[in-house]
Amino acid sequence: MSRILTWIKDRVKLLRSMRLWLFVMTFAIGLLPCIMLSHVLLSSYERKAIDIRTADVTNQLHIISDHLITHKYMQVNSSESIDAELSQLSNLYNGRILIIDQDLRIIKDTYGISQNKIIVSQEVIRAFRGETVSNYDDQDGYIEISMPIIENVVTDDNGSQSVIRGVMLTSVSSDTIINTQDSLRDISRLVNYLVAVALFVIAVSASAIVTIPLKRLVLSISDVKEGYTSNPVMVRDYLETENISDAFNSVLARLKLLDDSRQEFVANVSHELKTPMTSMKVLADSLLVQDEVPAELYKEFMGDITREIDRENQIISDLLSLVKMDKTSSDLYISQVDINALIELVLKRLRPIARKKNIELEFVSMRQVDAMVDEVKISQVITNLVENAIKYNNDNGSVRVTLDADHQFFTLEVEDTGMGIPEDSREQIFERFYRVDKSHSREIGGTGLGLAITKSAVLMHRGTISVDSVEGEGSTFTVKIPLVYIPQSN
């Protein structure tokens, strides 16, 4: 049973092959018109040949009809010349001619088997009404023509009147037409066979040639299965393969960048976690190697150890926050939040820190803003941005927080008068553990994860964050978040 299922799956998989469909389309597009053209030509030939044969026989019958009237054959029923002419015509077309008088009696049958018999048929009746009727029987292979025998009679007023004296019912064979048609059909079949063979070769070759670049593309992509490769995929045969190559190279470059970022992140985490541990070990060893350590020195070292523990705890807390941010947005707890009140609450908490550097915190609200957001994460965004604006500000500086909104988004701007950000660092400040000035940042403190956490929280809300900065003058961070959160459909 499993073998049968495997066989069926293989056949279904084969039906999805691009090469197979290219072959089928090329073969069908080339062969079907040939078959249709052959059928049309043969049908056209048959109709044309029948029409020509019918017209030819009709002309001959018109001549004989005139002779029948001239020799008064319908009255005397005998004439050697007329009989010879009728026999010659019937032999020429391998047919049969019946002469029927006004009493529907057969007065002449070239076969000699129906003379003096009465014949009644629709064709004969129509001929007596003055119609010339022709029918083609393609099953039995003959053409039947019914034609009236008309005599022009002079009337008493020296006029003329057409009088139907009888009917000629003629059947002629179409064997020669059929034989010719059969010969043409055999020739067309031979041509179609040759065309089919040629198309088969062309279709196989074309489908193989067209799919070669795709195979090369697959092989190139397969090279990265064992790891990332520094050689980009270069398949430029077609515009489509070129676009695929460029797209794959972009993805590959992105994956390489992510891998480098991951390695750098692991290295930074290891360094950041190891540094407080190293400091604590040095302090503890210093206490251990000394005998009768003074209480003041012991207290000082223990205070340093406590600060290092707090620093380690802060790094771990930020890492945990970042991990939570990396999860899906289903972890968001959306509710209706008064953004104005939330900003005022955050600024109230941070004002004691700002006072230490005599920094003024200013909140400018353009309008009342209520939004469907995760209050904890948005609070963390505001806190990180304002806290950074305070830390990296100059003494006696200022931080302005501006809130505005339109019908779709609310915008939060945090502007400071600090040291600013160099232009070459603005694209990297949202990366984890990135610091513009590592020596100065070490003095200020922090883990280097605040902006990464902020960006993750903003992206989870389908928002954007950007920075505009002038080195030495200050920076402005702009956050734009939808007023109504719309979950992403699966």
Image (tube, helix red, strand yellow):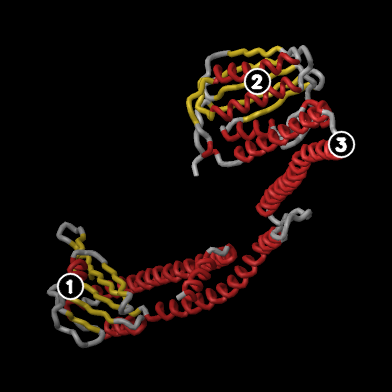
Residue drawn at the location 13% of the way across and 79% of the way down: 118
Amino acid, disc 3: Asp
Q: Can residue 427 be seen in this snapshot?
A: no
- Residue at label 1? 121
Q: What is the x, y in percent for residue 129?
A: 19, 64
Q: Secondary structure at mark 3?
A: loop
Residue drawn at the location 72% of the way across and 20% of the way down: 390
Measured Cα–Cα span from mark 1 to mark 2: 103 Å
Measured Cα–Cα span from mark 3 to mark 1: 142 Å
Determine which quarter of the picture holds residue 126. Answer: bottom left
Q: Are marks 2 and 3 in contact (CB under 8 Å)?
A: no
- Residue at label 2? 413
Determine which quarter of the picture holds residue 304. Answer: top right
Position of 219 with respect to 481 (left or right) is: right
In this rendering, the answer to whether 267 lies above or below 230 is above
In this rendering, the answer to whether 460 lies above or below 126 is above
Mark 2, residues whose alpha carbon is within 10 Å: few (<14), some, or many (≥20)?
Answer: many
The residue nearer to you, when weighing 313 against 361, is 313
Residue drawn at the location 63% of the way across and 40% of the way down: 323
Mark 3, residues whose alpha carbon is within 10 Å: few (<14), some, or many (≥20)?
Answer: few
- Residue at label 3? 291
- Which of the two labelled residues, at mark 3 and mark 1, occupies the earlier sequence position? 1
